[in-house]
Amino acid sequence: SDQEPPYSMITLHEMAETDEGWLEVVQSLIRVIPLEDPLGPAVITLLLDECPLPTKDALQKLTEILNLSGAAACQDASHPAKHRNTTAVLGCLAEKLAGPASIGLLSPGILEYLLQSLNFQSHPTVMLFALIALEKFAQTSENKMTVSESCISDQLILLEKWTENPDYLKRQVGFCAQWSLDNLCRYNKGMDLLQSNHCSRELEDTVLVARCDASSFESVRCTFCVDSGLWYYEVTVITSGVMQIGWATKDSKFLNHEGYGIGDDEYSCAYDGCRQLIWYNARSKPHSHPCWKEGDTIGFLLDLQEKQMIFYLNGNQLPAEKQVFSSAV
């Protein structure tokens, strides 16, 4: 997190300091980010997060340029990348903006566009990012009321049935729909409504499924300490995106807004299957496993007698990692 950003990032940041430049950056993100690249949504989030906050005039101009509506959501259905990128941009902006700016951005046309994107005719990834965008807008209380009073509940009830779908992309949609029913809409199972800004991540009722779509580096960790023996757990990845998963001691830092997660200090080590890296002390080295994909199972072995960690991808192991034990007390 102490490294200087690349030159291209600095250039985009400087370009976005004017309304015209910011609009060009946003339109380019919508136009060029490919659907198939698992890093695509992360790139959109990262670049928009690094850009200055847009002015009221820039937001108004963007709304006019995009000209979103329910009908627009049905256009170019065979080319979903544009819609995925548009919904991802809207979600990022909704998270960055506060109060009146977020309320103003959620125009009737944009609300119709997001709701229409939840129909079964849409590509599942468009549905997923439309759901996330609606959640982000609902972080503002007035928007939350607007969204919850729309026709969204009926569609969420249908999408919730995808929570155990064998298609992992649809399973993500089902998980988000379930969370929205419990926390965003008045239709729920008698649970108290949660304010999403009080949570750094969403967990299923089983506390075994974790999700993160924030721009910060969120973490989920177990607080049960072990100091002897042989320990092993597995993770099934529902998405092929960027994650660092591994083992940590009690001294490891988890500072989401500073970019610290597992593998980012000397007290933890992490496996990154998207970028094919092992992380220790904020430094990485490549590993020989292929990129993970939806449905892959990652294994994590901790051998406290031999002082080593071993990572597995679908049963195929990597050489042991031992760096953390030189720092562990």
Image (tube, helix red, strand yellow):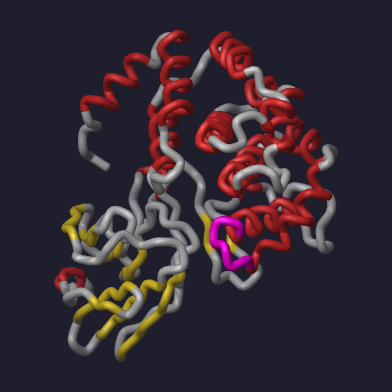
Part of the protein shown in magenta: 165-170
Judging depth in this view, the residue of 271 and 190 nearest the camera is 271
Locate residue 265 relative to residue 88 in the image: left or right.
left
Q: Does the magenta stretch include residue 296?
A: no
Figure check: 21 above or below 121: above
Q: Is residue 167 magenta?
A: yes
Q: In the image, what residue occupies the spot 37% across and 72% down?
A: 298
The number of callouts visible is 0
Q: In the image, what residue occupies the spot 35% across and 14% down?
A: 15
Any part of residue 197 in sight: no
Residue 37 picture location, percent across and down: 39, 45
The quarter of the picture where residue 292 lies is: bottom left
Figure check: 281 above or below 221: above
Q: In the image, what residue occupies the spot 35% across and 46% down?
A: 259
Figure check: 125 above or below 233: above
Residue 193 picture location, percent across and down: 75, 53
Residue 10 picture location, percent across and down: 27, 23
Judging depth in this view, the residue of 165 and 265 nearest the camera is 165
Q: In the image, what residue occupies the spot 43% across and 72% down?
A: 235
Locate residue 321 relative to residue 243 in the image: left or right.
left
Figure check: 321 above or below 194: below
